[in-house]
Amino acid sequence: MLHGSFWMISLRWTIRLVGLVSTIILARLLTPADFGIVAMAMIVVGMLEVLSYTGQKLAIIRLEKPTRDDYDTAWTISMLVGLVIGVCILAIAPFTKIYFHEPRAVAVMQCLALRAVMGGMENIGIVDFRRDIRFDRFFLYNAIPKATSFFVTIGLAWYLRNYWALVAGMLTGQFTGVVLSYVMHPYRPRFSLAKVSTILSFSTWTLIRSIGVYLNTQVDQIVIGGISGAASMGRYAVASDVATSPSREVNDPLVAVLYPVMAKLQGNLAELQTLYLRALAWSGIICTSASVGVALVAPEMVSLVLGSKWLDVVPLMGWLAISAGLLGLSSGAYTLFDVLNKPRIGARMQWVRLIMLAAAIVPVGILTHSLVAIAMTQLAVTAVFMPTLFFAAGRQIDLSARHYVAALWRPFAAAALMALVVRLADMALPLESFAKLAFDISVGASTYVSSLLLLWTISGRPPTAERDIVGILQNGWVRAMQLRSGPGRIHGG
């Protein structure tokens, strides 16, 4: 699992590095309104595209011995759904200006309808990259289209200086991905509906959950788009992306690898318990360190990464980062529900959270018109929701609150100590700009790791994620010493 996670984390960080560089450049070439126009269009486009997340790929990964009919049926469903979504985007596009009061978003949506159609044509054979845990191949398949999109977007942004560069980049990336799927995998799908009942019996609940997931990520921006306009929405969208990426882009790859590994253990309850708790502890370490870290360095991070015209998003960053960190702890639970063939539980939990978010954010947005208040509300709802999700997951594999506390208390304590030490260090040694950012990151990282391992040692060195970290550090040290010794000395000279 950790070997697969290495490739997935490498993939996500390659993509995010490209995205970060892209954001830094585009933030200087384009205006917040440009980002806001595309964000408005993507809310509606994404809301329809989420209908393509019907779970047919997950259904194939879960099957012990999928047949050609399974693959062909999954591809046929994807193709038909893509065509329907494209038509729906074209039909709905003219009406979106009524809500957003932004006619330029209509043409953007109409162009992005093509992206939905292309997405449905992707070769279903590439699901084998995940099924066989070949994440090195999966890495290449995802990284190449992203790099292509990057160069097209930056080149057109420099030339056009408007939002059409973003649109062209998205279309180019999607087209490259479809072509690459047929180049990298020899499977050639055919039209078939032979296994439609088998695929849909699993994927219907996955679709319902996917819709809930998407709306959960967009409800705050939907409210902002309706009350504040393109510029405010652009600021909030960029702040959310920058604040949540450090935790999300390490944790999500871990969870992506978790599904095929768990699928091989679905008949062994004891192994599922151990793997789920080990993965949860890893998520705790990743999410607490990254989210609290972003909150600590937000002013310098925004100034250096985005530029001075984005400084008004700094008050948002901490709230959005901590909220994303808490939410990251939930990912393994939804994977568990799918592996146990109970995707309906995951779907229900996503819609419970959506109802809670909407009930809280809509009135806060209307009454305050404050982006900070909306971000604070999102964090509060997430904090209330998480215990209910843990309870639902625990019921499936006989876990109690004690198991969750044992897995998570050390990462949370280490994050609190990191925040305290960084604040005290800043008071003792006031720095500015890049020097302060570099100082805070180095002090925070060293404090977090040392605190985490000290607490683990005090706890009796249980077989948790910290043991994995120690093993990785020890292996790295041995390899470094071997390289330093030279090949002759390694083999005895």
Image: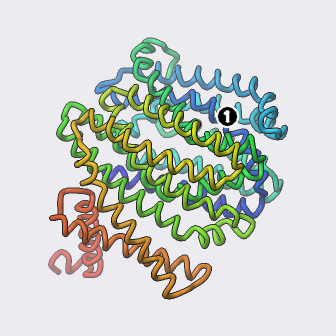
- Closest to the observer, 309 or 376: 376
Q: Is residue 465 above or below residue 356?
A: below
Q: Is residue 172 visible?
A: no
Q: Which residue is mark 1?
A: 45
Question: From the image, which quarter does the C terminus lie in?
Answer: bottom left
Which amino acid, by three-letter code, is at mark 1? Val
- Single out the residue that lies furthest toward the bottom: 429
Q: Is residue 191 visible?
A: yes
Q: Position of residue 250 (x, y in %)?
A: 44, 55
Helix, strand or loop status at disc 1: helix
Snapshot quadrant of residue 459? bottom left
Q: Position of residue 352 (x, y in %)?
A: 47, 33
Q: Is residue 403 above or below residue 73?
A: below
Q: Position of residue 39 (x, y in %)?
A: 70, 45
Q: Is residue 332 above or below residue 338?
A: below
The structure residue drawn at horizontal position 39% and vertical position 35%, both measured from the top left corner, is 128
Colour mapping used in the image: rainbow
Neighbour class for label 1 at 10 Å: few (<14), some, many (≥20)? many
Residue 119 lies left or right of residue 130; in this view the side is right
Residue 221 lies left or right of residue 409; in this view the side is right
Q: Is residue 420 above or below residue 186?
A: below
Residue 469 lies left or right of residue 39; in this view the side is left
- Single out the residue that lies furthest toward the front: 367
- Closest to the observer, 384 or 26: 384
Q: Position of residue 324 (x, y in %)?
A: 49, 52
The structure residue drawn at horizontal position 54% and vertical position 54%, both measured from the top left corner, is 15
Looking at the image, how many numbered discs can be counted on the residues?
A: 1
